[in-house]
Amino acid sequence: MMAKYVYVFGADATEGSAEMRDLLGGKGANLADMARLGIPVPPGFTITTEVCAYYYAHGRQYPPELASQVEAALGVVEKATGRRFGDPENPLLVSIRSGARRSMPGMMETVLNVGLTEQTLRGLIAQTGNERFAYDAYRRLVMMYSDVVMEKGAGIEPAEGKGIRRILDARLAALKARRGYGSDVELTASDLKALVARFKKTVRERLGQPFPEDPWDQLWGAIGAVFASWMGKRAVEYRRIERIPDDWGTAVNVQAMVFGNMGDDSATGVAFTRNPATGENAFYGEYLINAQGEDVVAGIRTPAPLNAHSRNEQSRHLPTLEEVMPAAYRELVGIRDKLERRYRDMQDIEFTIERRKLYMLQCRTGKRTGVAAVRMAVDMLDEGLIDARTAVRRVDPLQLVELLLPRLDPQAESKATPIATGLPAGPGGAVGRAVFTAHDAVEWASRGEKVILVREETSPEDVDGMHKAQAVLTSKGGMTSHAALVARGWGKCCIVGCGDIEIGRDGRSFRARGGQVVKEGDWISLNGTSGRVYVGQLPLVPADPEGNPFYVRLMKLADGFRKLHVRTNADTPKDAAQAIAFGAEGIGLFRTEHMFYGEGSEEPLFLLRKVIMSSTEEERRRALDELFPYVKADVKATLAVMDGRPVTIRLLDPPLHEFVPHDRAKLARLAEELGITMPKLRKRVEALRETNPMLGHRGVRLGITYPEITEMQIRAIFEAAGELLASGKNPIPEVMIPVTSTVRELDHQKAIFDRVRDEVRSQLGLAELPCLFGTMIEIPRAALRGGDIAATAEFFSFGTNDLTQMTFGFSRDDIGGFLPDYLRSGILPADPFQTIDQDGVGELIALGIARGRATRPELEVGICGEHGGDPESVMFCHRVGMDYVSCSPFRVPIARLAAAHAALAGPEEEGN
Ligand code: PEP
Ligand code: MG
């Protein structure tokens, strides 16, 4: 049977369906589905993603059957519309649009009005009786086609600002200025006629080819350009950020044109079935009278609100669609309800009204802020649209970041005066230095600067810079502009359509309405929830997710599904309390050494240095006795906060030289306390230096050479726990040995553990002093020898930071030097220090668990490397049967939700 590459939709002959998303792309599948639902969709056809794959596998050639299938499908569309492609009397015009499996907003190309030539133009004028309209359509085609097909599609890369689109735009602007027109609508038929002639001349001069006057050349040119745009720079960049595989390919949709620019009884718009910023169950959108779809998204004119709910500061004075075209609006509301019932999710739709008749051009699952995602999931559950499992799976764990990240301090904000207000497109607060190009944003951010990208409007070329910036601020564009869509998708703070600012001619500054000038590098602060812009650095305060009832409910549902427990990595009572507030069920990693850094660490650090610099056991024991009360107090404070929850306390891990002072005064005090001379002290410091400290004298190796260090720490833990126990509390300590590679190391330390426990128990007169003894698994050998290590260890905690370092042989501190090259060239799919390398490191983990549990079936297993807060890694931890993940306090809610997703994932998703 001949392969089928083309599927017709609309025209009573719809061949595709919603289930065929992989083959038809999201747009094609949904157009087919809408047509099946009886929603008015202009007829057309979809060329499948298989053709895209074929095209790239065969040196940009199409399968031989394609041409005849396209011709046949176009015949169906001609019949349905009663028009003919290329017919000078009654021409059919079509749009050519991309459509991948997952939406990539604005990343690929579109060409409208294909089929319009000098010949068919006359027919279009006759059909519509509107010469101005026909010439306007023609000039749009020339602009788009020359840009998308003749320049980008041909791989021509003009210098910055010298692209054909820019040149033609400038011509158009110059003409309007000469004529004194405020908007495109004022251009007359003869203006446009003259403009088209000039455009075509310019195209021939600049691109060395005439604008094609054969409609079939136009059609195939546009189809080719859409396929080519799949491998365009910005699409590739976007896929890298979103982790969309390159081999998915795009489909191409060819659809009969309908026109929103046929006069004041025509319009075009973009809408969301619910508010994408807040999640409120209210129809939300924007439209423009007498315009084509590109005008709304490009932000050239301020769009008007769909209804009262959609009004904002910029559009408050404009009439709503509900007021201007009540019948079309009512029909749209009916479609909105139908779509929500059908897809059971918020949809992002594009519509056109041609002479009062409504058409749907697109519908897809809409991007939303994290706040909105949570609210929609819970609301839809209450409305009976979805069940609890779906509600939990609806929210991407990383979307919660937005609810957990800081916002501008409301107190400081109430005292500050905003210099401008725009549309709140992405919530939260952000503080950064103003930069004015995406390129600068990337460059400054790579130097560790926090930047806010300020643009008139953004385009798909800016995505990398937007990604690297703390926030995005645009002076133009609406809530459906490119900047708003992209930022919303990422949960990034974003303000758009900020008409109160004007970007300077130098492109390196902006002036606010009140006259304040902000130059490149100046600090600004943004409140993305209210749309306010401030000069300077306003303080940020933590978010308050628990104050959001939708969040609280969603997390409760998630907790009901998950199997994994979620602990936190914390080593202060403050962090521990924060983590409990975020839902942590214990501490999976308490790094003892953290008491020697930061606030209040002066004295214990000095005493630790004394320990390190001691040269005899006796000297060291004296210093350890002095240090002991600090360690005990530190452990006790956190055990007290975590009452009733397990706390895994890890013994000293870093190489000792990390604690050696460098400044003279501190060295001098040490020498004095130890009663030795400076040269002698320097000699001892020198002796601690290691060539490769990460693989050196650290972790359990310290406890082997200096058992008294282990002993002091274990005694501190038992006394702290014992005293809490005696006072009626319920401490649950677990002692963890780091950097283990052989069970003999553990046996050595376990003997100290057992002896000290007995001593403290009798000293405090306690019958029991429960405490698990376990180890980190962070050296490949330890994973391999999990079987014998579990004979001594009662729990394993995978330290995937070091395990990744030692499995790959990548230094965790130096990977930044070459990782970008590895990612760019696809050698690594992701940073293995962020997302577990399931094939390699993951295999060691699975093997370590299996061998460990073969020896000790009740072995408790967790993870405490950074990966414990990464959703993909959490899914993996669930699959390999861990008991818990442990991550930083702010990641706890993300891990909780990811653990629920893991538990709800069907077998078909498990392997992905
Ligand atoms: C690890 O190695 O994964 C770990 C948690 O320990 P640290 O990061 O302290 O080396
Ligand atoms: Mg480690």
Image (tube, rainbow, N blue to C red):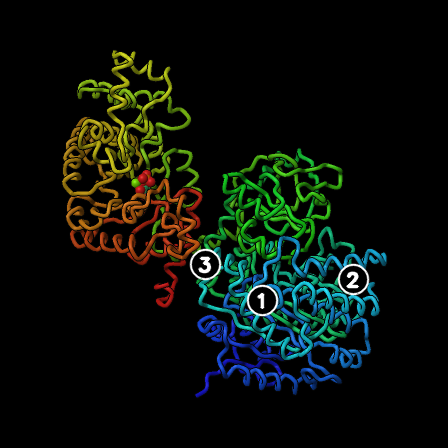
- Find numbered disc 1 in the image and state the secondary structure of the residue it sits on: loop
| Cα–Cα gap, marks 3 and 1 | 24 Å
Circle 3 Cα neighbour tier, 10 Å, few/some/many (<14 / 14–19 / ≥20): few
Q: Which residue lies furthest to the right in this view?
A: 179
In the rendered image, which residue does mark 2 sit on? 184
Left or right: 696 as drawn, with respect to 250: left
- Position of 697 with respect to 55 (left or right) is left
Q: With respect to residue 698, does 375 lie above or below?
A: below
Q: How far apart are marks 1 and 2 (CA)?
A: 27 Å
Q: Residue at x 55, y 44 (%)?
A: 470
**Who's the residue at 24% across and 24% down the image?**
687
Quadrant where the C terminus is found in the figure: bottom left
Secondary structure at badge 2 equals helix
Q: Which of marks 1 and 2 is nearer the N terminus?
A: 1
> Looking at the image, can residue 644 be seen?
no
Disc ID at residue 627? none
Q: Give the amino acid type for the residue marked by disc 1 in the picture.
A: Gly
Which numbered disc, 3 or 1, marks the residue closer to the eye?
A: 1
Which residue in the protein does label 3 denote? Answer: 243
Q: How many marks?
A: 3
Going from N to C along the chain, the mark reached first, 3 or 1, is: 1
Quarter assignment of residue 696: top left
> On the image, numbered disc 1 is attached to which residue?
153
Q: What residue type is labelled 3?
A: Arg
Q: Position of residue 856 (x, y in %)?
A: 17, 51
Crowding at dot 2, Cα within 10 Å, few <14 / some 14-19 / many 20+, comes out as some
Can residue 15 be seen in this snapshot? Answer: yes
Apparent side of residue 883 relative to residue 3 in the rendered image (left or right): left
